[in-house]
Amino acid sequence: MHDEPCSPNAQTGDMPDSQTSSPLTNVRIRTFQLALFGLFLSTYAYFSSAAQWNENSRFDLTRSVVERGRLDIDPYHVNTQDKAYYRGHYYCDKAPGVSFLAVPAYAGLYALRHAVGKELPRQWVERTTGEPDPVTGRPLLHPIMRYNAAYKRGLYFSNLLANALPAALAVALLFGFIARRRPHTIGAAFFAAIAYGLGSLAFPYATLFYGHQAAGSVLLITFIWALHAPPDGPPKPWWHEAVMGFLLALAVAIEYPAALASIVVGVVILMRSSRRAATVAFLAAGALLPAVALALYHNACFGGPFSLGYQHLANKQFAQGMSKGLVGITIPNPIVLLRILAGPHRGLLYQSPVLVLVPMGIAVLWRRHQMEAIAITAVITAFLLLNASYYMWDGGAALGPRHMIPSLGLAAVALGYAYPSQPGRAASWTRGLVWTAAVISMANMLAATAVGPEAPLGVFDPLTAYIWPHFLHGELALNIASSNVGLNMHLPGLVSLVPLVVLWTGAAVALAWVVKKD
């Protein structure tokens, strides 16, 4: 097949940023995408998910479906306080999407271990001796959850399929999207992909069995797909729109607040369509399967299609918080909003300073694609206001404002437009500054992922008071059941990250060579 250059006018309507280099060919873009997918999947797969309350709740549902063919988590619920209780049974209180996405991976592992007679996943409570009781003088016994190696592997492969893989795919597609939009500035595409995939909360949460990053990956993939063809081109095949409807509904089934972004992306798809009535029908048809499945799940577990696990929480403290407003959501708090953005406790920009560039990228995008700029702004704003309205806005034991994660993929599109493109010394200095911000963000996210993103509740500044002190002392994988490939190879402390650093160094050298030609 003839390798044609990627034409900005034919593909997107974008004008080239500068004429400093030849436009990328589609084959070259796909080659880079494949390489980035492998690099990011290897990076996310390098770390093993912790077995904390949030992860365990989701994994309990996966286990119960595979091992028992049931939706309740009665045999496993002792390992989490993130659970619902309804009519005599315990359930995962989360949106079930990521748990069901993990079923094939866990089912395969479980069947294989069962077939060869290997130990199956198991958990148990171990009581450890603590300090003496001040009254009786007898040692206090503290219950601690323990997990065998099979449990950890099951959790690892579940996260790999349901979370890490779509995250790596989203990063690769983001690169291709920006590369085609800005074909004369390959550095912009690499910058957006790396800043998002390694310099934002996408990195640590792609290694944890949560739903936030999985939903964010699905939303970004759908947004890119929706914008791939020019609005004045031939209509998309009907099944494209049906699949996009499926993905938008799937994002909601993975993480309920993703509905905010799904609506916005759905409007973008509709506004770009030349046959809007048909587009609505195809989107709705595609969304029907996940929507009906979610309603049936709610009905089976909580007695109604719109009854959520959050309305039947077993933990009284959580239930009290969720009783405020609409499942814990009231009105935005301006002080909380400021802390979400810049505070040391959960500040998005404090931990990932590269995201400061997002408004600049939106401003550039506004001059070229107003509807897309509006959509990205709307999604970011909606999640900021939602997070600032939530009673547990800090996300408990967490790194950063984790409830913002589903919006970060769309924000990363703006990062691709914030990257300076014009030739000259001033632009060179500016590129140096934006890459410096990206490197600082990447260092923070790597340290957090290696130590354990779920910093203890009492830590006000997770970066300076918890993550970096432990990281610099080589105290890694502090969360229960977490690990990394190096530790599994019996490499100690920071040495356990050497294989990953070697991988990154090779990729960085290759990237520097490619960008230098830009």
Image (tube, rainbow, N blue to C red):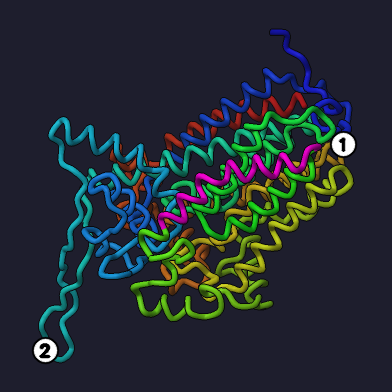
Q: Please report whichever mark, 1 or 2, sits nearer to the chain's N-terminal start.
A: 2
- Dividing the image into 4 quarters, which one contains the C terminus? top right
Q: Residue 184, how many percent across, how many down?
A: 81, 28
Residue at image point 56% right, 49% down: 249
Q: Residue 434, how many percent across, how many down?
A: 73, 47
Residue at image point 73% right, 12% down: 3
Image quadrant of residue 130?
A: bottom left
Residue at image point 49% right, 31% down: 503
Image quadrant of residue 139?
A: bottom left
- Dividing the image into 4 quarters, which one contains the N terminus? top right
Task: Count numbered badges in the picture.
Answer: 2
Q: Under tag 1, what secondary structure?
A: loop
* Residue that carries the numbered disc 1 in the rendered image: 422
Q: Is residue 27 magenta?
A: no
Dot label at residue 491? none
Outermost residue toward the bottom? 135
Q: Which contiguous range is marked in magenta?
A: 274-297
Left or right, 137 with respect to 99, comes to left
